[in-house]
Image (cartoon, rainbow, N blue to C red):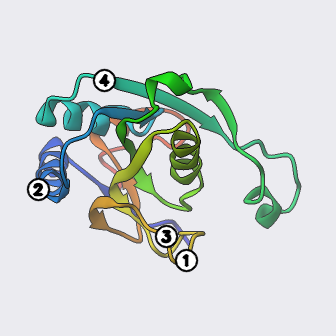
Amino acid sequence: MQERRELLTWQDVDRLIDHLLPQFEGEFDAMVMITRGGIVPGGLLAEAIGLMHILTAAVDFPAQMEMEKAKLMAWPQFIQFPEDNTLRGRRTLVVDDVWGSGRTITSVKHRVSSAGGIPSTCVLHFNPYRNLFSTTKPDYYAAVTDVHIVYPWEISRGPDMVLLGEG
């Protein structure tokens, strides 16, 4: 069975951003965008709210174990992460494109917190059906989905390439 997909346009992304903005409670002092998925939505959100203190985090979950479920238990490897002093005491918006399993954004949230920051999580799409954290969800999200979302910046990239002409 082929995975269901939804191909978004830039106008769809604009509507998602417009849906997120009124949800924010107060102002943020910093943003941590998770690479690669959080770069575009993070940039759009930072511009919309006038945020200047923008940082990035790159996280990998090594596939050290053979069983698929065991892979979900792997510890994150932080390839890139801001210095603690850039987060300490700052109300920080942690941004990614999708909350699927929730592992990546939750790892970043906890690392921001351990650095002394006050993290809130934000994604364009929340998939509660893949979420590994039964009672945890993003603080801010624009839409709920159960399909694979393909954003306009992903259309012709990588091995998961989507061709516009396919039905």
**Amino acid carrying mark 1 in the image:** Ser
Q: Tell me the crowding category of disc 1: few under 14, some 14 to 19, or many 20 or more residues within 10 angstroms, Cα based.
A: few
What secondary structure is marked by label 1? Answer: loop
Q: Quadrant of residue 128?
A: bottom left
Between 90 and 159, which is closer to the camera in this rendering? 90
**Amino acid carrying mark 2 in the image:** Pro
Q: Earlier in the sequence, mark 4 or mark 3?
A: 4
- x, y percentage for residue 73? 77, 59
Q: Is residue 47 above or below residue 113?
A: above
Instruction: Return the mark for residue 134.
Output: 1
**Amino acid carrying mark 4 in the image:** His
Q: Give left or right: position of 92 versus 56.
A: left
Q: Nearer the viewer, mark 1 or mark 4?
A: 4
Residue on which the image places disc 2: 22
Gap in angstroms between the C-alphas marked 1 and 3: 6 Å
Residue on which the image places disc 3: 136
Q: Give left or right: position of 47 versus 79.
A: left
Task: Give the total of numbered labels.
Answer: 4
**Amino acid carrying mark 3 in the image:** Thr
What secondary structure is marked by label 2? Answer: helix
Q: Is residue 136 visible?
A: yes
Instruction: Return the mark for residue 53.
Output: 4
